[in-house]
Image (tube, rainbow, N blue to C red):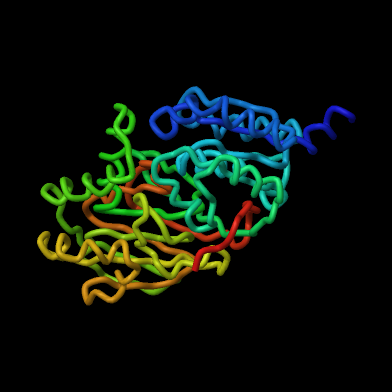
């Protein structure tokens, strides 16, 4: 019993050593010294492969940990969230997640004012001000199999998923930086075209010439773009942005709208909100969630309202 109580009083720290082009490992000695400086009791686990953070989270919760710190980027955060929702030991709502951002994009952290400074992030974690945010769950196809994934920031289909796939491929080969997504966006325009798709939002059907689509719990993706600028992370709704058929030069001419929050003012871009979303098409539409490349259509999204505690600094308007 004494041993289990110690798990409840300590933080499980899951470190992705490869995050931020190796910053997770390179900066670990500094981060660990700051834990000691601020008397934060931790138990540390390092990931050694893709999806390992899911396993480490599940095992840690089974041992008794209820407070988790992610040292990584949006992808590591996504894996930890999936571990929280896949485990059967306790309700996800009884868990708390904090973040020390060492990734390249860190888009989830922007929504909650998580600073780049490791020491400031640890001070915020120690204060433990929590926000009960929504979680998304998506069911999709991967070949002939049906798979499921949880996410807490943004999912994208179509062109966005292509850009993410190319970006992740380059990250795995050692490239990085906040502009990587932007340059892959420009390069991908040459090869991509719209796809006729059926979109059903809370039972209402829309027929679209789909170029790209984003479903947001948070606002930021792609290293600071605002594809779902009106998203509220605890309102029980996805904010949905659908970019319809558009000429490539028109896409390039309006790229600034991805960054300044005005994307929904464009006449060929539609905005919706909804709790349940279905997407299907005769041609496969590919999917990403929280920057993780997944599978393809048919795709079904559902929201899980106010379902996990996250530590925040301030909620950005």
Residue 142, percent from left and from top: 36, 40
The residue closer to the viewer here, 243 or 255, is 255
Vertical placement of residue 262 versus 176, above or below: below
Vertical placement of residue 62 versus 201, above or below: above
41 left or right, relative to 163: right
* Residue at figure coordinates x 47%, y 55% from the top left: 110
Residue 308, percent from left and from top: 63, 53
Please, which residue is most extreme toward the right here? 1
296 left or right, relative to 68: left
Residue 117, percent from left and from top: 53, 43
* Residue at figure coordinates x 84%, y 27% from the top left: 3
* Residue at figure coordinates x 17%, y 47% from the top left: 188
On the rendered image, what quadrant is the N terminus found in?
top right
The residue closer to the viewer here, 283 or 258, is 258
Please, which residue is most extreme toward the top here? 48
| Number of numbered discs on residues | 0
* Residue at figure coordinates x 52%, y 39% from the top left: 79
Vertical placement of residue 151 versus 56, above or below: below
Residue 132, percent from left and from top: 64, 59
Q: Residue 100: name its quadrant.
A: top right
């Amino acid at each position: 019993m004494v041993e289990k109580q110690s798990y409840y009083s300590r933080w499980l720290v899951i470190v992705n050593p490869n995050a931020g082009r190796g910053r997770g490992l390179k900066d670990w000695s500094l981060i660990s010294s700051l834990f000691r400086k601020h008397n934060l009791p931790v138990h540390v686990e390092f990931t050694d492969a893709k999806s390992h953070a899911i396993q480490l989270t599940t095992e840690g919760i089974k041992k008794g940990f209820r407070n988790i710190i992610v040292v990584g980027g949006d992808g590591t955060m996504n894996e930890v969230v999936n571990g929280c929702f896949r485990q059967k030991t306790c309700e996800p709502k009884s868990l708390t997640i904090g973040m020390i951002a060492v990734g390249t994009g860190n888009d989830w952290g922007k929504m909650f004012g998580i600073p780049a400074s490791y020491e400031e992030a640890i001070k915020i974690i120690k204060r433990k001000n929590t926000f009960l945010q929504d979680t998304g769950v998506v069911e999709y196809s991967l070949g002939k199999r049906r798979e499921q994934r949880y996410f807490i920031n943004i999912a994208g289909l179509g062109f966005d998923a292509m850009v993410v796939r190319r970006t992740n491929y380059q990250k795995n080969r050692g490239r990085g930086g906040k502009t990587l997504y932007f340059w892959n966006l420009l390069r991908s325009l040459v090869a991509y075209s719209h796809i006729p798709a059926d979109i059903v939002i809370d039972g209402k059907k829309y027929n679209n010439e789909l170029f790209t689509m984003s479903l947001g719990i948070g606002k930021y993706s792609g290293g600071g773009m605002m594809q779902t600028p009106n998203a509220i992370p605890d309102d029980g709704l996805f904010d949905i942005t659908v970019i319809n058929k558009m000429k490539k030069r028109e896409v390039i001419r309006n790229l600034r709208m991805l960054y300044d929050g005005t994307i929904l003012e464009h006449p060929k871009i539609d905005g919706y909100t909804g709790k349940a979303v279905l997407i299907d098409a005769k041609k496969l539409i590919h999917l990403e969630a929280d920057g993780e490349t997944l599978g393809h259509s048919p795709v079904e999204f559902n929201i899980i309202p106010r379902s996990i505690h996250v530590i925040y600094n301030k909620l950005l308007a």
